[in-house]
Image (tube, helix red, strand yellow):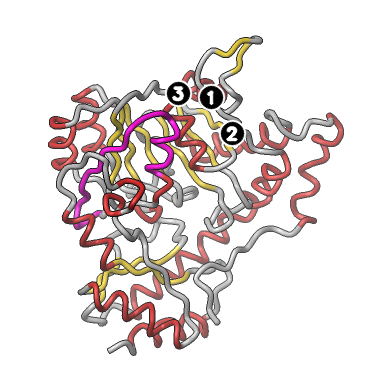
Amino acid sequence: MIRFIRPSVPPPEAWLPYLARSYDERVFSNSGPAARRLEAALAERFAGPGRAVTLAASCTTGLTAALLAVGARGRVVVPAFTFPATAHAVVQSGCRPVFCDVSPDTWELDPDALATVLHRYPASAVVHVRAFGFGRDLADVGAVAARTGARLVVDAAAALGGLLPDGTPVGRAGDAEVFSMHVTKVFGIGEGGAIFAAPELAERVRLACNFGLADGDVVMPGLNGKLSDVHAAIGLAVLDRLDAVLASRQAVAARYDRLLADCPWLTPARTAARAPFQTYPVLADTRARAAALVEHCGRRDVELRRYYAPALHLAAAFASCERGRVAIAEDLAGRMVCLPVHSDMTDAELATVVAAVTSCA
């Protein structure tokens, strides 16, 4: 069976040395030495000048903390085409999600649709989602949010290690950009998140992740969102080998591009091979084909997954939420299928996946 996700976490001998100082100082949480070291390493490599990194227990926690840190209140606009965690973070921050449509080309928030939604439903913040971890220029979305005074938080869950089209590392957009380090992600440590933001905002994120405590007082809303040093140590070991992992996964995606190019009923993502490629998303020509493809490949011991289905405005938990037009999001959710990408995927495994996909009548 070729599983959809096959995590590849560094073995203990690779990350245990990074815990030496934690044991020396007997500090294993609350910004311990391994956590501080990982924050500094991520900031130096990806965040760029003027941004700091704060670690969190998960990406969802990081999104919640970022919304608390920017002072989001009332409505927060999110795409209808995303994983439920995006909207859950809005709810957990005490706000109300408002769903917006996405572009059929980028699969991310459509600037025109966003402008319409913000006019109809004035909001304190916008959460933009980097669909499938792709690194796209968000200038248009940022400009629309800025015109209304809405803060922009970027859910870049699957994008850590990715690049923008100009070669700039992902992580420098919006007021804050939030990443996942869940074991299913390319930068997988088990559970974890990272928030990139200006130093002042990063400090508010840190306060939010520590119950809102400062100088013996509760100064803002908060939660327990800290990352342990054990997870941070694993993160340091992941960082050591990240270049090789990214190159391997991008090579898999490039082979999918070539081998599926002549499949008339599949449309791959329109993006340069700069993403980490947690998965390889394709758009089937019909809803029926998408459902049949998953079932067909399953019978051939190839596991595919549907992302992001259903569109969030159709989920029972969010059915009563306000929304603008969401027709494109609903259509994409009905036709999107993701193929497996593994860091150690063999040519034979990839050929098996392609054969299973292309044999679906």
- Say if 325 sits above or below 280 in the image: above
- The answer for how far apart the CA atoms under marks 1 and 3 are is 9 Å
Task: Using residue 46 as the reference point, say whether residue 282 is left or right of it.
Answer: left
SS for callout 3: helix
Check contact, mark 3 vs mark 2: CB within 8 A: no
Q: Can you identify the residue that label 2 sits on? A: 225
- Say if 349 sits above or below 84 in the image: below
**Amino acid identity at mark 1:** Gly
- For residue 222, the mark is 1
Taking depth in this image into account, of 328 and 356 the one nearest to the observer is: 328
- The answer for how far apart the CA atoms under marks 1 and 2 are is 8 Å
Q: Quadrant of residue 244?
A: bottom right
Task: Using residue 276 as the reference point, say whether residue 244 is left or right of it.
Answer: right
SS for callout 1: loop
Check contact, mark 1 vs mark 3: CB within 8 A: no
Q: Earlier in the sequence, mark 3 or mark 2?
A: 3
Percent x, y of residue 108: 27, 49
Q: Can you identify the residue that label 3 sits on? A: 69
Percent x, y of residue 76: 30, 32
Check contact, mark 1 vs mark 2: CB within 8 A: yes
Identify the residue at horizontal 48%, vertical 33% (top origin).
196
Percent x, y of residue 330: 22, 58
Q: Earlier in the sequence, mark 1 or mark 3?
A: 3
Q: How many marks?
A: 3
- The span shown in magenta is 86-106
Q: Quadrant of residue 255?
A: bottom left
Task: Using residue 133 as the reference point, say whether residue 289 is left or right of it.
Answer: left
Identify the residue at horizontal 54%, vertical 32% (top origin).
53
